[in-house]
């Protein structure tokens, strides 16, 4: 049986899990109403249960005490009995589909923010400030320690009363328990610090109190780091000693292991490895812990593929694999394996859109699956065939929005033609995938390619759709997703010309796509600070160019996301790319063979010049509206989208109206430049009712 | 002169016939003993012929009527001719009776001849093309020589010339019809066929009975061979049965392996056994050869091995391994020959004595020996598929109304969906059921069909011992192979149970109104009858009735019911995997496609696996249990109860 190792049930304490695949604890940022697991939360997890997951540990960083605020990340609040009935809904939903559900509980200590909500005074073993949240804190007193230990026990009791199957104590990412463990943060000399036993005492007392509260039949585990990756932090050997210490108590039913600490931007990037990392980069750390403990070991981090999961499990490195982002991208991952539809799994590409949103305190969404966490709105993961009219749908543009529109319309049972000017699907994804360590983003296209082939759509590559070609097909619906082009003509002084030989500046697209040769000495001006600028810098430096990337924003790459900019920086610093902030590109002029770029300081107004052989400008995208305005007046709906219906996930009213001619919609960057998720979301919510 | 010569001719022919009969009987007697009652068999024979066999023949009305006229006319004519012309009892009334009989036979023979003018490929040629001429000659000659007896013509009409001509005609006629009957001519079928019916090895087949379970091999008997190596290792009545073949080729036309171009033709196989019985080679076989195997290269004798693994024997091993044991040949055979028994007997020798199970066969048998399941999976994982279902275990409950026999589909991800769907149905109906869990082992079906009787019996005895610990009313299973083996083959080893296929059981649950069902949503549906449910066990109605209950109007395939074409998955055929020109499941899928149905409902894990192995696009494949589970609706909760207990919703069954 293929993937047999994934489908071995496993015993965690008294609890039997139906298979070896889990969703590990992550902050979903969707617990609302004071940290309650309301409908959106339940539906998000229920979809995973329907899709066959064995175990979900929900609620990353769910708090047990009122001085560990839950509001910043809309995390679950276990400090009140009000949570219990919500848990009952959640547990019922999961159990109905045969999955088990636990919750991670924690006190964040210093790893949160104090300015807002109840304006709490943050607590930490020795009152040392935490840099990421700029969190200053007080030194915790023994009375507070015992109160928080009691809070843990009460929280675990609430999880049990709510019918959940277990709790995971978070001792990872520098929460309170591992703040006590770490000599970097715990400088105490009393019984709660100093010696190894002293540093372990808080965690041990928490475990004892929780166990006393919930008894032996309730599953209790602990998640810890396999190595903090700080010179003065806890090493792998330290963590083996700690894991064994708690395992020896016999009170733990499982141990979850995360490679890396997470209390600096750079270590945080390890915790949720993006596409620049190899597969399962920290499996060795989990395997090292497994060597010294008896409890089953759970491990996630870049395990996305069923073959990979099977290999890891068959190798016996760990007992259960977390495929957390894999399940965010495709909650039906397990079901598709069981249905022998492995090729239909929408695989996580490690774009980290989910986690990078979470670190901004906004709800977790998937770059490529717009239905994830929106199940409660009625956005489907599985598109049902229409029982109504079969329509002729023409989609123009093979980028993410166009591909999703074509897929959804074809799943609905319509007759779909997709025009794409270039000879491959993907749109801007194809360009983005050219940068070093960013190739996996092309996985988004790969999935669509497979799906569109399976659905048998009429795919017309290398074909520019004009009005005549579209109207020849006598469409009922035309969806334009024609994207745009780099916005280089915003300032005439930049010297942009359509003919690239005459133009003084080139775009990041030109560079990444290979349309222009890389220069030797390059200035990149990046007003956007997302992916394209730093990708081009990395690409050019990789080809041997000397590169300076300049922005008038805070810093190049600063909008790429919390777990993404660090991996760019690792690469850019290694290649000696210069990153300069606060400079605006004023003018480019030619001087002999060289180009001179005039830069002006945003704050002082002083100007400086760079003499280079290539100037690359990243200034976002200008929508391609030609086709839209050509067709607009001929369409029945004049190209208008009914926003109320769209936002309410309801069918466009014009679909129900009789009439001759076609309906016209546009989505994605050809309307206004946003991002991949926005294009896919618009396509899904618009086309799901075609 | 005719009056003198005719009796001589006839008695000579009859004497030769008796000599031939004695010779033929002694050929059969080379076979091993068989426990049949000779006298009771003979007594039962007329009824078996007139009722049981006629039912099979009657499926082909043209041939049935032709045969009634020809054979009835002949039997009557022969008896009267012996009386009238042999014993010279020239009574006028007898003469008229004989004339009537020859006319009847003549009419029948005309239709025989007509069919021979453009015969279907399945019919053998050669001597069989001669037969209608002989029949006509017999009837015409006796008609003419009887005219004077009836007083229609004077005795001396035509003179010597005509007399000689008539004598020649009679001689031809009786040569074919009398001694040809026992000396190996086409008319042998009448002689051997009648005795075959009398001494059939499966007397249970007659009188509306059904007998499809393989006969157990006595592994303890020191002198009994382990299967059939040479023709004389068959029982004498099996040898007799081979001789009954009329080479009509109905088996050939029904055989999926033959159609797929695999080297098997059941008709040829039976004829090869006849060759083996008497000694010789197959050069004169006048029918379709085994696909891809030229005639004239194979030969054998009663004491020579049938299969020569080093060279060429009577039959190649691949011929025997091509059979899917679907019983289509047996079902079609108007002479009620047991092809599958013979094939399995010969496989037993190859597997047990030669260790020559081809391709994955040996591996599968090793797996069964080591792990009790054919896939070699860790036996501890037998219940993994149900880890989240909290299935009641027999070892804990000790008794239940229904013992749910899971089968080895437990290890197959596709079949797990069927199993889970069926559990959903059982739970929805509130059935008191339990499973054996780790105590269940492979039923032994595949081992037995691959000829490994020892492994079959070991598995069966261990299963019987497990079952003996618990009390249950019935066994229900989603697997027709387990169903058949438990129901029909465990009895000989001491395990007697009431066993139901899940379609039968669901039909019962529906009839008892224990399921609240909505309507099937989705496209049109056809239904494929699994061989081991249909032909082996006669269950054609329950699956259709269940489908009807969820609003499905089955778009029947041309070959359905007892004529259903095998999926190719039975008898270990996918394991021994003998190559052909096309794949059996592809052919069956074409049958399915011809109905235009968007979905084929199945009731067997093998069929499911075979059909899903057909490349897409093709209709979807769903087990009946899945369709029923999908159609389940939540029963409205009684007003006094809180509506909490929703049945399990299993998206991926």
Image: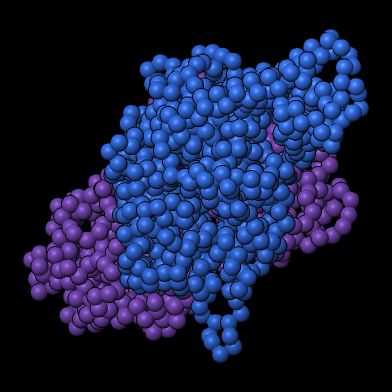
Chain colours: A purple, B blue
| Residue A91 at x, y percent in the picture | 43, 73
Residue occupying image coordinates x 14% and y 71%: A201
Asked where in the image residue B15 lies, by quadrant, the reply is: top right
**Towards the viewer: B282 or A107:** B282
Furthest residue toward top: B161
A229 to the left or right of A245: right
Residue occupying image coordinates x 40% and y 15%: B311
| Residue A237 at x, y percent in the picture | 14, 52
Furthest residue toward bottom: B640
| Residue B274 at x, y percent in the picture | 52, 25
Vertical position of residue A472 compared to residue B479: above or below: above
Asked where in the image residue B76 lies, by quadrant, the reply is: top right
Q: Can you say which quadrant of the picture contains the N terminus of chain B?
A: top right
How many marks do you count on the picture? 0
Vertical position of residue B449 compared to residue B177: above or below: below
Asked where in the image residue B223 lies, by quadrant, the reply is: top left
Q: Would you say residue B628 is visible in this rendering?
A: yes
**Towards the viewer: B71 or B116:** B71
Residue occupying image coordinates x 51% and y 16%: B281
**Towards the viewer: A582 or A489:** A489
Vertical position of residue B63 compared to residue B623: above or below: above
| Residue A443 at x, y percent in the picture | 50, 41
């Amino acid at each position: 049986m293929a993937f047999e190792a994934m489908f071995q049930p496993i015993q965690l304490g008294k609890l039997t899990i139906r298979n070896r695949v889990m969703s590990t604890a992550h902050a979903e940022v969707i617990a609302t109403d004071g940290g309650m697991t309301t409908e959106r939360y339940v539906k998000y997890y229920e979809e995973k249960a329907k899709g066959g997951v064995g175990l979900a540990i929900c609620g990353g960083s769910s708090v047990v005490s009122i001085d560990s605020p839950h509001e910043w990340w809309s995390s679950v609040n276990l400090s009140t009995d009000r949570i219990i009935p919500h848990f009952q809904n959640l547990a019922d939903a999961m159990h109905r589909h045969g999955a088990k559900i636990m919750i991670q509980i924690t006190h964040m200590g210093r790893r949160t923010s104090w300015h807002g909500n109840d304006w709490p005074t943050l607590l930490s073993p020795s009152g040392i400030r935490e840099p990421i949240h700029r969190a200053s804190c007080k030194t915790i007193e023994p009375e507070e320690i015992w109160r928080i230990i009691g809070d843990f026990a009460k929280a675990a009791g609430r999880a049990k009363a709510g019918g959940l199957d277990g709790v995971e104590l978070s001792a990872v990412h520098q929460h309170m328990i591992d703040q006590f463990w770490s000599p970097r943060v715990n400088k105490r000399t009393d019984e709660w610090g100093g010696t190894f036993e002293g540093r372990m005492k808080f965690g041990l007392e928490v475990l004892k109190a929780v166990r006393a509260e919930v008894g032996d039949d309730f599953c209790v585990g602990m998640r810890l780091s396999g190595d903090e990756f700080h010179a003065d932090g806890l090493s792998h050997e330290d963590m083996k000693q700690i894991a064994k210490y708690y395992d020896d108590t016999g009170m733990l039913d499982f141990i979850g292991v995360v490679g890396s600490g997470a209390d600096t931007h750079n270590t945080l990037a390890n915790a949720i490895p993006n596409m620049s990392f190899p597969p399962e980069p920290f499996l060795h750390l989990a395997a090292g812990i497994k060597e010294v403990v008896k409890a089953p070991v759970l491990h996630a981090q870049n395990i996305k593929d069923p073959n990979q999961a099977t290999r890891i499990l068959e190798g016996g490195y760990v007992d259960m694999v977390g495929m957390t982002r894999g399940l965010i991208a495709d909650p039906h991952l397990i079901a598709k394996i069981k249905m022998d539809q492995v090729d239909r799994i929408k695989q996580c590409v490690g774009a980290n859109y989910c986690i990078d949103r979470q670190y901004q305190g906004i709800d977790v969404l998937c770059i490529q699956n717009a239905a994830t966490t929106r199940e409660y709105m009625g956005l489907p993961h599985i598109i049902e065939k229409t029982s109504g009219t079969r329509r002729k749908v023409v989609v123009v543009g093979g980028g993410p929005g166009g591909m999703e529109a074509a897929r959804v319309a074809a799943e609905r049972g319509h007759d779909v033609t997709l025009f794409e000017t270039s000879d491959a699907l993907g749109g801007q994804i194809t360009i983005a995938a050219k940068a070093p360590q960013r190739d996996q983003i092309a996985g988004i296209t790969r999935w669509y390619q497979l799906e569109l082939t399976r659905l048998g759509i009429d795919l017309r590559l290398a074909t520019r759709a004009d009005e005549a070609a579209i109207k020849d097909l006598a469409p009922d619906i035309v969806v334009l997703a024609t994207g745009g082009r780099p916005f280089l003509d915003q300032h005439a002084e930049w010297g942009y010309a359509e003919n690239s030989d005459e133009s003084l500046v080139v775009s990041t697209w030109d560079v990444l796509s290979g349309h222009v040769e890389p220069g030797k000495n390059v200035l990149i001006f990046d007003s956007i600070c997302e992916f394209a600028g730093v990708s081009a810098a990395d690409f050019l430096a990789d080809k041997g160019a000397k590169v300076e990337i300049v922005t008038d924003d805070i810093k190049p790459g600063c909008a790429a996301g919390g777990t993404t900019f660090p991996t760019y920086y690792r690469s850019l610093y290694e290649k000696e790319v210069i990153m300069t902030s606060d400079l605006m590109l004023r003018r480019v002029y030619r001087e002999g063979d060289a180009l001179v770029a005039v830069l002006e300081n945003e704050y002082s107004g002083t100007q400086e010049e760079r003499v280079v052989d290539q100037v690359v400008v990243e200034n976002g995208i200008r929508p391609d509206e030609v086709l839209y305005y050509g067709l607009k007046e001929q369409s029945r709906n004049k190209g208008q989208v009914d926003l109320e219906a769209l936002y309410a996930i309801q069918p466009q009213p014009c679909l129900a109206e009789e009439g001759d001619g076609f309906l016209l919609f546009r989505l994605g960057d050809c309307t206004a430049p946003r991002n991949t998720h926005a294009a896919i979301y618009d396509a899904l919510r618009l086309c799901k009712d075609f | 002169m005719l009056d003198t010569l005719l009796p001589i001719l006839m008695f000579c022919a009859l004497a030769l016939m008796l000599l031939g009969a004695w010779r033929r009987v002694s050929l059969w007697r080379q076979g091993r003993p068989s426990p049949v009652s000779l006298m009771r068999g003979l007594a039962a024979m007329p009824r078996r012929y007139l009722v049981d066999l006629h039912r099979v023949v009657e499926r082909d009305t043209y041939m049935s009527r032709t045969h009634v006229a020809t054979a009835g006319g002949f039997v009557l004519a022969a008896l009267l001719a012996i009386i009238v012309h042999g014993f010279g009892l020239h009574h006028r009334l007898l003469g008229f009776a004989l004339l009537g009989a020859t006319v009847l036979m003549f009419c029948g023979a005309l239709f025989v001849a007509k069919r021979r003018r453009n015969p279907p490929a399945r019919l053998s040629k050669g001597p069989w093309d001669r037969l209608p001429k002989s029949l006509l000659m017999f009837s015409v000659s006796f008609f003419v020589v009887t005219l004077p007896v009836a007083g229609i013509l004077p005795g001396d009409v035509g003179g010597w010339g005509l007399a000689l001509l008539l004598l020649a005609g009679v001689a031809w006629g009786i040569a074919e019809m009398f001694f040809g009957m026992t000396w190996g001519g086409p008319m042998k079928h009448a002689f051997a066929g009648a005795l075959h019916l009398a001494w059939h090895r499966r007397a249970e087949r007659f009188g509306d009975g059904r007998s499809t379970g393989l006969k157990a091999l006595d592994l303890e008997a020191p002198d009994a061979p382990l299967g059939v190596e040479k023709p004389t290792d068959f029982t004498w009545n099996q040898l007799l049965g081979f001789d009954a073949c009329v080479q009509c080729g109905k088996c050939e036309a029904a055989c999926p392996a033959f159609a797929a171009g695999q080297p098997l033709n059941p008709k040829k196989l039976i004829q090869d056994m006849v060759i083996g019985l008497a000694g010789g080679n197959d050069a004169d076989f006048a029918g379709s050869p085994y696909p891809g195997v030229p005639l004239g290269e194979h030969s054998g004798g009663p004491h020579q091995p049938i299969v020569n693994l080093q060279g060429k024997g009577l039959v190649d091993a691949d011929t025997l391994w091509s059979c899917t044991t679907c019983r289509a040949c047996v079902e079609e055979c108007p002479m009620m020959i047991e092809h599958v028994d013979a094939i399995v007997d010969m496989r037993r020798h190859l597997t047990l004595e030669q260790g020559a199970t081809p391709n994955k066969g040996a591996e599968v048998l090793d797996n069964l020996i080591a792990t009790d399941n054919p896939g070699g999976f860790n036996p501890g994982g037998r219940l993994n598929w149900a880890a989240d279902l909290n299935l009641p275990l027999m070892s804990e409950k000790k008794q239940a109304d229904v013992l749910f026999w899971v089968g080895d589909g437990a290890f197959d991800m596709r079949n797990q969906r069927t199993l889970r769907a069926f559990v959903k149905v059982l739970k929805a109906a509130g059935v008191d059921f339990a499973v054996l869990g780790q105590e269940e082992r492979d039923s032994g079906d595949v081992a037995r069909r691959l000829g490994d009787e020892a492994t079959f019996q070991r598995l069966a005895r261990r299963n019987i011992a497990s079952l003996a610990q618990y009390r249950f009313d019935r066994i229900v299973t989603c697997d027709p192979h387990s169903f058949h083996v438990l129901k029909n083959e465990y009895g000989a080893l001491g395990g007697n149970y009431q066993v139901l296929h899940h379609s039968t059981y669901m039909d019962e649950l529906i009839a008892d109104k224990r399921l609240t069902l909505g309507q099937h949503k989705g496209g049109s549906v056809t239904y494929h009858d699994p061989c081991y449910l249909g032909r082996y066990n006669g269950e054609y109605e329950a699956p259709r009735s269940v489908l009807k209950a969820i609003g499905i109007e089955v778009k029947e395939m041309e070959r359905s019911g007892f004529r259903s074409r095998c999926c190719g998955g039975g008898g270990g055929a996918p394991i021994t995997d003998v190559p052909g020109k096309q794949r059996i499941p592809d052919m069956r899928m074409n049958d399915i496609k011809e109905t235009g149905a968007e979905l084929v409902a199945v009731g067997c894990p093998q069929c499911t696996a075979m059909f899903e192995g057909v490349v897409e696009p093709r209709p979807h494949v769903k087990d009946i249990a899945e369709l029923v589970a999908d159609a389940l609706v939540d029963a409205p909760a009684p007003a006094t109860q809180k509506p909490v207990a929703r049945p399990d919703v299993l998206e991926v069954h």
